Amino acid sequence: MIHARITGTGSYLPERILTNQDLEKMVETSDTWIRERTGIEQRHIAEKGQLTSDLAEPAARRALEAAGKIPSDVDLLIVATTTPDRVFPSTACLLQQKLGIHGSPAFDIQAVCTGFVYALSVAEKFIKTGAARCALVIGAETLSRIVNWQDRGTCVLFADGAGAVVLEASEEPGIISTHIHADGAYESLLTTVKPGPDVDLDKLADGTAFIEMRGNEVFKIAVNTLGRIVDETVDAAGMTYADIDWLVPHQANIRIIQATSRKLDLPMERVVVTVNKHGNTSAASVPLALDTAVRDGRIKRGDTILLEAFGGGFTWGSALIRF
Ligand code: UT7
């Protein structure tokens, strides 16, 4: 049986840092409120002209280097993003060109904050069926472009970044299982401005499609849904919570992360937290957190890792991994 194994991770954050103190000068908020309600201290913001594929490229190159691969080894390229460079070509095609890869399938996946988990799930199937042997799977975002910088309820949360993994065919188990879900009935709780009689469509075409969120409702559903998917994942593998070495959660809010850690009975020392430094980077958040903990030596080969995410749609998903 062919398994799909992560053989390298990489990430990239734009240089510019926006602190809570900076935000205090932009909207009516405070460092104390942001820290206490979200856990965020700072976030990275792309420079003018720096697009999602520009963040994805260094993350991808770092993952390839860690896996001992070169771009021409890649036979599948998937980018999960909510903020593509253009409507088309896909960000995956634009990245493929930057990396000098020719001929492999390359496409984007749009599942908002669950995008990376969706992309991993799709790539895993390509590898396990023999349709690909070396996949580059990336989550990359420039969310700062769709944030309403006058809305204190959302502008303190979202940020930019990219994370990548190389997934290869292997005789040893890697990805044990992935679980992905969606329910469009919740589309209005976390969305972008919808076209309608009061909305200037020309402005939307300029990229003025702002994030709108009913934060408190999203929060409660996220906590419950993530609690359920954790059970689904562990049960499917015939494991118990005690078998999990590391939780690598979507980095939306420290209080949501703490709720999942309590549910798993996993001390926070076994949970990878980057929300304080990265904010919510949507599809980039899980691979960014994974790469952070791999590179600082916390996550080691052989560890059992649970990835989970929840986002607009609603979409939600998980992956159980033997690293
Ligand atoms: O990644 C995709 C999934 N997204 C999420 O999981 C996000 C889920 N939601 C959340 O993380 C939280 O709901 C927020 C951090 C967005 C908000 O925290 P909350 O504890 O749910 O606050 P709230 O929305 O209930 O608002 C409480 C108060 C309100 O004031 P009043 O009405 O009580 O006077 C807000 O207007 O906090 C106010 N508020 C702020 N105050 C200072 C909202 N944003 C801010 C702010 N600074 N930035």
Image: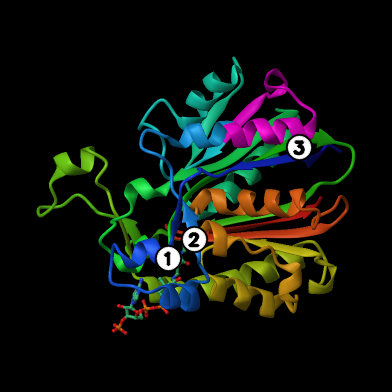
Residue type at tag 2: Gln
Between marks 3 and 1 in the image, the one whose residue lies nearer the viewer? 1
Q: Are marks 2 and 1 in contact (CB under 8 Å)?
A: yes
Which of the marked residues, 2 or 1, is nearer the chain's N terminus? 1
Residue type at tag 3: Lys
Q: Is residue 115 left or right of residue 305?
A: left
Residue 70 among magenta residues: yes
Q: Is residue 189 visible?
A: no
Residue type at tag 1: Asn
The x, y position of residue 21, in whole percent, is 40, 66
Q: Disc 2 beta carbon < 8 A from ligand 1?
A: no
Nearest the viewer among 190 and 225 is: 190
Which of the marked residues, 3 or 1, is nearer the chain's N terminus? 1
Displayed-image quarter of ligand 1: bottom left
Q: Disc 3 beta carbon < 8 A from ligand 1?
A: no
Q: Which residues are magenta?
A: 58-78
Position above or below: 261 against 78: below
Q: Which residue is mark 3?
A: 128
**Residue sitting at x 17%, y 43%:** 203
The x, y position of residue 170, in whole percent, is 85, 36
Between marks 3 and 2 in the image, the one whose residue lies nearer the viewer? 2
Alpha-carbon distance for marks 3 and 2? 39 Å
Q: Which residue is mark 1?
A: 20
**Residue sitting at x 59%, y 58%:** 317
Q: Is residue 169 visible?
A: yes
Q: Which mark is residue 42?
A: 2
